[in-house]
Amino acid sequence: MSEQSISDDFSFQNLNPERIADALADVGVNPQSGLLALNSYENRVYQFIADDNQRYVAKFYRPARWSDAQILEEHQFTQELLDEEVPAVAPLQLGGSTLHNYQDYRFAVFPSVGGRAVEPGDLDQLERIGRQIGRLHAVAKQRPFSNRPNVSYQEFVTDAMATLRESPLLPDNLQEAFWAIAEPLAEHLKCTDIGAFTQQRLHGDCHLGNMLLRDDQLMFVDFDDARTGPAIQDLWMMLAGDDRAERTLQLDVLLEGYQEFCDFDSKETVLIEPLRSFRIIHYMAWLARRWNDSAFQQAFPWFAEQRYWEQQVLTLKEQFAVLQEPPIQLQPNY
C-alpha cells in the first residue's frame, strides 16, 4: 500500500459529526438528517439525507493510505463503468472535482444506492455475476492504471509478513508453530509469477459483499482496492466451498457468463490458490496494522484471542497442502 508513516490513533480521532457536516457544507451539501455510520473500517462512511431530500453517502478516506492521484484514478474508473452502462457507484462531481479536502480529511460524496446482499451458491446467479465481471473487465482493458498499485508478492506477502513479525498480538506460545508454517508458505509463494500473465485494471476486492442486487440488477460497490493484476483476481473469490469438483463447476459457470464479454486465459487458474494464500496472509497483516484504530478492536475482537491464531496455524497448513495439488482444470472450450 502507499501508506506513509502515520499513527492509526490519529487517523480519524478528530472526525466528529460537526467536522463532517462542515466538510459537506464546504462542497454545497447540507445534511438534514443524522449521519448513519455504514459498515466500513478502512475508511469512514456515512449515509444521510440532504436538504434536497436525496439520500447520499460521504466517504472519508483513511489519511495517508492513497495519494490524491490514486483516489482520482479509482473515481475515473467507476465513472467509465457508468458511462458504459456497467452498474457501479461513482462519486459525484462537486465544484469541479470528485475528491475534496477539509482540514486534512479527504472525502467524496456518492449517491446512496440501496440493494440487497448477493447470496452465494446459486449457479444461475453465478453466471449472471460472470457476465457482470466480464462487462467490467471489457471496460477495464481499454486503458491501464497509471498510479494504482499492482497485485504483488511484495505487498501481499513480504510486507505483510514483516507486519506480523512486529505485531504483539501473535501469542508467544504460538510463535514457533505459526512461523514454522508461515515461512515455508511464503517461500513457496515466491514462485508465483503474476507478471507472466496479462495485466489489467481490476476491482481488486471483488467478492459477494461488494456486490448488490438492486432492481434485479447486479451492481458493483467499493472500488477502494482497485489495482492492476490478472483477470482471475476478480473471479476467484466467487468460488465457495471446500470441494474441488464443486469449485470447478462454479468456475465453469462463472466463465460461461464472463466470456460473453471477455476472453479468459485458462492458464490463469494456476494463480487461484496462490492468490488465496496472498489474501489470507495480507488480511492478518491488515488487521494487525489497524489494531490501534478502535473501530477495528470493536469489530474484530477475536483477532487478539488465542483461538484465532490457533485457527490461522491450521488454515496456513491446509493452504500449503492445497498448493501442492494441481490447479483446477477447465473444460476444453476455455
Image (cartoon, rainbow, N blue to C red):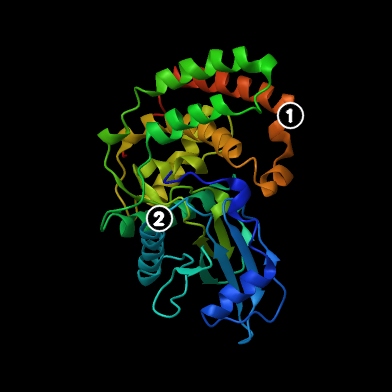
Q: How far is the residue under mark 1 from the one under mark 2? A: 34 Å
Residue 240 coordinates in the image, percent (x, y):
56, 38
Residue topped by disc 1: 305
Q: Is residue 287 left or right of residue 196?
A: right
Category of crowding for the residue at label 2, using alpha-carbon neighbours closer than 10 angstroms: few (below 14), some (14–19), many (at least 20)? some
Question: Residue at image x 48%, y 37%?
Answer: 249
64 vs 43, left or right, is left
> Foreground: 230 or 161?
161
Around disc 1, counting alpha carbons within 10 Å, would you say few (fewer than 14), some (14 to 19), or many (20 or more)? few
Percent x, y for residue 238? 51, 44
**Residue 217 position (above or below residue 192):** below
Asked if one can make out residue 330 in the rendered structure from this viewpoint, the answer is no
Q: Please give the label number shown on residue 242.
A: none
Give the number of the mark in front: 1 or 2: 2
**Residue highlighted by disc 2:** 67
Q: Is residue 100 above or below residue 61?
A: below
Q: Secondary structure at mark 1?
A: loop
- The quadrant of the picture occupied by the N terminus is top left
Q: Secondary structure at mark 2?
A: loop
Image height of 299 relative to 249, above or below: below
Which image quadrant: the C terminus?
top left
Amino acid type indicated by mark 1: Glu
Most foreground residue, 52 or 15: 15
Whether residue 212 appears in this view of the structure is: yes
* Residue 251 as seen in the image, left or right of residue 144: right
Could you say where residue 299 lies in the image, as x and y percent from the top left?
A: 71, 46
Going by the numbered disc 2, the residue's amino acid type is: Ser
**Residue 27, position as x, y percentages in the image:** 51, 79
Q: Earlier in the sequence, mark 1 or mark 2?
A: 2
